[in-house]
Image (cartoon, rainbow, N blue to C red):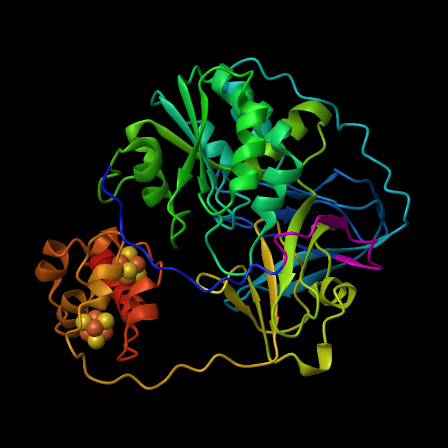
Amino acid sequence: MKRLNGIRLPKSKRAQNKQITVLPLPKLIRIPMLMHMGEPCVPCVEPDEYVYVGQEIGRAESDKAVPIHSSVSGNVSVISEYSLPDGTKVPAVEIIPDGLQVIHPDCIPPKISNQKELADAARKSGCVGLGGSGDLTYQKFSRSEKMNILVLNGAECECFLSTDLRQMLENAEQIISGAAMIQKIMKIKEVLIGVQSNQPAAIQVLTQAAEKQKGITVCPLPPLYPQGEKKVLVFHTTGLVVPEGQEPEDIGVLVLNVSTCAFLYQYAQTGIPLVERVVTVDGNAVPKACNLQVPVGTPIIDVLSYASCELDLVKEIYSGGAMTGVCYPAFRASVVKPQNGLVAMKTVSKRKAPTDCIRCGKCLSACPMNLMPTEIDRSYQKRDVAALTDLHTGLCMNCGCCTYVCPANRPLSETIQQAKLLLSNA
Ligand code: SF4
Ligand code: SF4
């Protein structure tokens, strides 16, 4: 099979051999009402109210939202205002934990015997894509098309991150049981689990766990970035091409992250919604990188302090990996459902001033979608919508490979995002 392009990122997964450790309960939890792709939830608890672990505290009033649950038991202190990284303000429920972690009596295993019940359960659980996307998992199960293949994404190709890797090493049985559950309910013939070939231990443990299940195969993938991007992942596992403007589900391929799959299995067993997640803590202000299991809504300053971060020296914090992470404006942020990484840096990433294109072709060789970033850049400068359409600009997935390799420091991927915006408004 032809291999798509990509880039080799520096080896920087310092936490990959660190077992998941449970973070002690913080003194305060602050849970923002928007932690998914879509619309915010509406707080449905009041100050001074006692809440349980797994109790709904944010109501989803649209099909572009899933409910938000308390990650601790304790008393609501206040409904405050929370700034998202893009500056948008949403309400946040602040809770003082009582340390008892009393689980809400409604947390009982759901009945899941058909696709509708699976979609309902995924929605009720508050499940979102745990690989960083934050998309609404229930929407994938609500589609009417027949899904032929389930692809599990274990290709954690970004710098720093090792949460999926640790899940695969420590919870392989749950991932496989979750895959088998979805496979059976959705009558899917084949499950393919994509894992980068430079993670042989994960490949081995998943292969062993899958031995007793029919139709589940682990697929070693080239150790390149952006192997975990869904169109690249689908091509390298199934050989299928997802056309421009379509999602893998449009061609009958259901894609789920391995950690999301493990969570869905846990939820089916316990009925406890998505109230905690594993976060890789790294960056040059963190002496010992680690993987921490954290209640959703934990202030990031508590997570960084636990990881002995040199707080006074921190110049930049971001959520996620180095290529696709989002910069946090302040320490006041909380850990949110899709957050797989928390990176604290003593240095500020400065980009050198761009110079003229020297036509080296490196951006072309790096692009997994075989796009021509220089031509798109040029056509965007002229606002040439027809040319941008002919150049298949819509296929760009904002991976940043072109910008990363450009010796002239041209901000190609940023320009291409602007070009996509121009096309969508044309
Ligand atoms: S950002 Fe877009 S154009 Fe650049 S390498 Fe990635 S997919 Fe290609
Ligand atoms: S990598 Fe940069 S310098 Fe080379 S062709 Fe692309 S835009 Fe031009």
Relative height, residue 190 to residue 32 (above, below) = above
Looking at the image, can residue 373 be seen? yes
Residue in the picture at 74% in, 24% down: 108
Left or right: residue 40 versus residue 157 is right
Camera-side residue of 217 and 22: 217
Question: Measured from the top left, where is residue 118 in percent x and y?
Answer: 54, 22
Whole-percent x and y of residue 178? Answer: 57, 26
Please tell me in which quadrant of the rendered image residue 309 appears. bottom right
The N terminus lies in quadrant: top left
Measured from the top left, where is residue 250 in percent x and y?
Answer: 30, 32
| Image height of 185 relative to 122, above or below | above
- Is 85 one of the magenta-colored residues? no
Q: Quadrant of the C terminus?
A: bottom left
Q: Residue at x 50, y 32 (%)?
A: 138
Judging depth in this view, the residue of 41 and 395 nearest the camera is: 395
Q: 281 or 69, which is in the foreground?
A: 281
Of 203 and 167, the residue lying toward us: 203
Above or below residue 63? Residue 176 is above
Q: Residue 24 in magenta?
A: yes
Is residue 420 something one can see in this rendering? no
Q: Quadrant of residue 416?
A: bottom left
Q: x and y percent of residue 314 in the render? A: 65, 79
Q: Please give left or right for residue 263 compared with residue 182 in the image.
A: right
Residue located at (48% from left, 15% from top): 214
| Helix, strand or loop: magenta stretch | loop
Quadrant of the rendered image holding ligand 1: bottom left
Left or right of 388, for residue 103: right
Magenta region, residue range: 15-29
Task: Decide: is 399 above or below 172.
Answer: below
Q: How many marks?
A: 0
